[in-house]
C-alpha cells in the first residue's frame, strides 16, 4: 500500500482538481503528467468526479487520489474508482477506519493542534493543513513545529504560485496543494498546453 508521505517525492505541488466535464478528465491528466506533475487529487465535488477519477487513473504516469473524502461510502467509492490514496478536509475515526478497512492510504485534514493530536493517535504523521491560509498559514506551521517535530504537513487552501515557496521552505512542509495548476478557464478552453506549462512551473518551485 502506498505511503502518503511518498507522494511528496514526486514533486512539490499536488494539484487540487475539480472536474466539471468528464471529457476534460483524461486530457487534463495527460497535460499535468507531461509537465512533471504526477500526483493528482481529484475532489469529490461534482457529479462526474468518480468517473473522472476512474478515467484519469488509467493515464500512464498518473497517481490519482480522491479529495474531499467525508464518509466511509466516499472511501469505498474512491477505492472502486481506482484511486491510490485519499485526502479529507478534516479527520474522523470513522473515516480513518474505513480507509484502513479498504486499504486506501489517507492524507487527513487538520486545522488545530487538537486535531493533529487526534490524527497522531490514530497513527497518522503526515497531515493536510486545511484551509491553510485561513487558519494561519506559515505562522501556524512554524508554531506547530515546536510541539510536533515529528509531524509533516501538506498545506492546502489559499496557496498561490507566489506564496507556495514560503510554505515549501518550512522544514515540516513536504509538499503543498494548489488549485492554480488547473484554472477553470484553461480547462473550459481545452488549453492543455497552458496547464502543462503551469505544471512545469509548479514542479520547479522547490529549488
Image: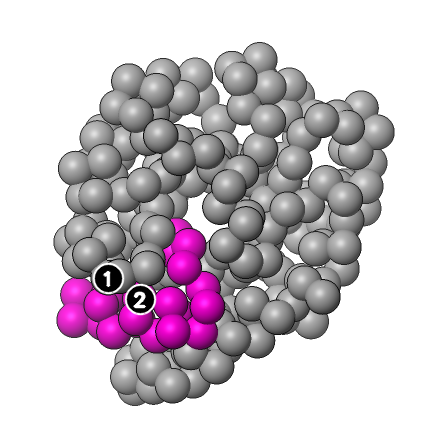
Tell me the quadrant of the picture where the N terminus can be found: top left
Q: Is residue 61 above or below residue 144?
A: below
Per the image, the residue denoted by label 2 is 29
Select label 2 or label 1 by which is in front: 1
Residue lying furthest top in this view? Answer: 121
Q: Residues within 10 Å of mark 2 (few under 14, many from 20)?
A: many
Residue drawn at (59%, 53%), measured in percent from left and top? 176
**How many numbered discs?**
2
- Tell whether label 1 touches label 2 (CB within 8 Å): yes
Q: Which residues are magenta?
A: 20-41
* Residue 205 at x, y percent in the picture: 65, 67
In the rendered view, does 48 fall on the left or right side of 86?
left
Q: Residues within 10 Å of mark 1 (few under 14, many from 20)?
A: some
Per the image, the residue denoted by label 1 is 59
Residue 21 belongs to magenta span: yes
Q: Is residue 114 visible?
A: yes
Residue drawn at (43%, 16%), measured in percent from left and top? 93
Amino acid at each position: 500500500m502506498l505511503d502518503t508521505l511518498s507522494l511528496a517525492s514526486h514533486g512539490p505541488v499536488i494539484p487540487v482538481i475539480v472536474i466539471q466535464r468528464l471529457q476534460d478528465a483524461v486530457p487534463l491528466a495527460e497535460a499535468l503528467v507531461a509537465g512533471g506533475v504526477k500526483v493528482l487529487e481529484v475532489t469529490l465535488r461534482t457529479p462526474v468526479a468518480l468517473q473522472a477519477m476512474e478515467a484519469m487513473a488509467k493515464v500512464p504516469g498518473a497517481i490519482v487520489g480522491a479529495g474531499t473524502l467525508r464518509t466511509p461510502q466516499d472511501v469505498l467509492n474512491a477505492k472502486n474508482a481506482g484511486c491510490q490514496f485519499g485526502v479529507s478536509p478534516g479527520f474522523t475515526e470513522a473515516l480513518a477506519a474505513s480507509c484502513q478497512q479498504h486499504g486506501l492510504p489517507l492524507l487527513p485534514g487538520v486545522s488545530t493542534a487538537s486535531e493533529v493530536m487526534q490524527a497522531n493517535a490514530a497513527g497518522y504523521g503526515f497531515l493536510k493543513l486545511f484551509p491553510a491560509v485561513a487558519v494561519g498559514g506559515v505562522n501556524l506551521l512554524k508554531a506547530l513545529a515546536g510541539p510536533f517535530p515529528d509531524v509533516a504537513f501538506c498545506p492546502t487552501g489559499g496557496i498561490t504560485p507566489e506564496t507556495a515557496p514560503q510554505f515549501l521552505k518550512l522544514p515540516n512542509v513536504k509538499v503543498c496543494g494548489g488549485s492554480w495548476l488547473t484554472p477553470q478557464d484553461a480547462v473550459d478552453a481545452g488549453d492543455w498546453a497552458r496547464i502543462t506549462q503551469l505544471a512545469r512551473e509548479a514542479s520547479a518551485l522547490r529549488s
